[in-house]
Image (tube, helix red, strand yellow):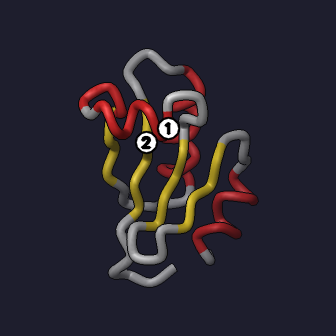
């Protein structure tokens, strides 16, 4: 993955799948911004039934749950 690409994890608090996705991002050694969709009505509408979602901001590419470490690394171009 390009060093300047921003990775975003769309999540909510107390979401066990979101915690698993965050763990996978940490295992992959990826710096990311976690955005709680409950803080924004538009994000809640867009991602409410799809979280967790990993997004590469530069390309707007998204990886929807479920995914494993291998799929995440492939998505990120690792």
Q: Against 69, is 39 above or below?
A: above
Horizontal and vertical percent for residue 19? 50, 30
Image label count: 2
Name the N-terminal-most of marks 2 and 1.
2
Q: Which is nearer the eye, 34 or 45?
A: 45
Q: Crowdedness of circle 1 by 10 Å Cα count: few (<14), some, many (20+)?
A: some
Residue pointed to by mark 1 = 47
Figure quadrant of residue 8:
bottom left
Horizontal and vertical percent for residue 6? 35, 68
User: Residue most toward the top?
Assistant: 14
Disc 2 from disc 1: Cα separation: 8 Å
Figure quadrant of residue 2:
bottom left
- Seen in the image, is 71 located left or right of residue 59? right
Residue depicted at x 48% and y 76%: 59
Contact flag, marks 2 and 1 (Cβ < 8 Å):
yes
Q: Against 57, is 18 above or below?
A: above
Residue pointed to by mark 2 = 10
Give the structural element (helix, strand or loop) at label 2: strand
Q: Which is nearer the eye, 76 or 27?
A: 76
Residue depicted at x 65% and y 65%: 73
Q: Against 63, is 3 above or below?
A: below
- Seen in the image, is 68 located left or right of residue 8? right
Q: Which is nearer the eye, 42 or 6?
A: 42
Residue depicted at x 55% and y 59%: 28
């Amino acid at each position: 993955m390009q060093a300047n690409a921003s990775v975003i994890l769309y999540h909510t608090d107390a979401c066990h799948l979101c915690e698993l996705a965050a763990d996978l991002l940490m295992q992959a050694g990826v710096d990311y911004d976690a955005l709680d969709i409950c803080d924004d009505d538009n994000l809640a509408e867009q991602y409410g039934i799809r979280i967790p979602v990993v997004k590469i901001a530069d390309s707007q590419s998204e990886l929807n749950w479920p995914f494993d470490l291998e799929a995440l690394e492939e998505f990120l171009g690792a």
